[in-house]
Amino acid sequence: MLTDYERDSAGKTLLGWVAMLNFKGKQIVIRDWELKDAEDYIFWRQPGRAWQKFDGPYYSRMSKDKIIKLVDTLCTKVKTNTLEIPRNDLAVADLVTDKLLGRVSWYWESKETNWLCAGIAIFSPEYWGNGRGFEALGLWTDYLFKAMPQIERVDLRTWSGNFGMMRLAEKLRYTKEACFRKARIVDGQYYDSIGYGVLREEWNQWHPKGFQKDIFK
């Protein structure tokens, strides 16, 4: 029987349906989006939420109309079973209640050289600093390496005012590889742009049976 990773890497199941993804930690699950997430996702993506003070605060935010359009498009993909392979992002949900807590994602830094950056946002401050982000980003890193055999590294970009993200990257043993001094402006003050990275060979050495197995050791 194919694992979720193998189904996703292969593209579709034998029946032609995209396999639904669901990877569990002790506190959270990273999973495919569901229609029930729509209202909460629209709420948390609105400008002015606390998580946005740390997640790229130097970038402009989507308008409410664009957020609704984004979520409508996502719901259509869920209804028609046309989610991307590999996934562009997954929902982070509470393991017990399945309540939407955040999102993990990735984008190409350089598609030409198979170089990508991962991202994570835990929306409510109530769930910061208690290991949920560690589980979510670890499971997501594991997924990216297994679902995308062509990549040799996963990057993480942040800024020197985001202490939580820097601690998270270092806890997962990402290496601090770049520091561009005074490259970001937040509230009129200059901060450094920070780059972390982990190589496939490092990740496989640390988690030979997968990150999920190590969570439950």
Image: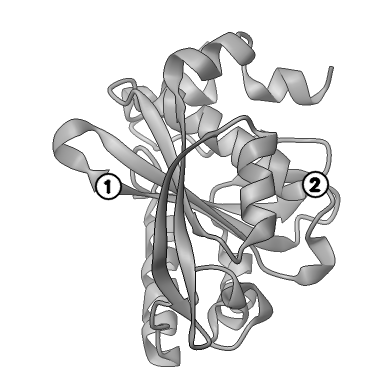
Left-right relation of 175 to 24: left
Query: Is 67 displayed left or right of 27 in the figure?
Result: left
Determine whether label 1 and label 2 are within 8 Å by CB: no
Residue toward you, 130 or 12: 130
Relative depth, front residue between 118 and 12: 118
Q: Position of residue 102 (x, y in %)?
A: 64, 61
User: Which is nearer the N-term, disc 1 or disc 2?
Assistant: 2
Label 1 sits on what residue type?
Answer: Glu
User: Would you say residue 40 is visible in this rendering?
Assistant: yes
Where is residue 42 drawn, in percent x and y? 55, 79
Q: Residue at x 42, y 71 (%)?
A: 184
Q: How is the image coloured?
A: one colour
Which residue is denoted by mark 2 in the rendering? 95
List x then y, in percent, for residue 205.
Answer: 57, 9
Q: Which residue is mark 1?
A: 109
| Residue that sits furthest to the left in the current view | 112
Could you tell me which secondary element the residue under label 1 belongs to?
Answer: strand
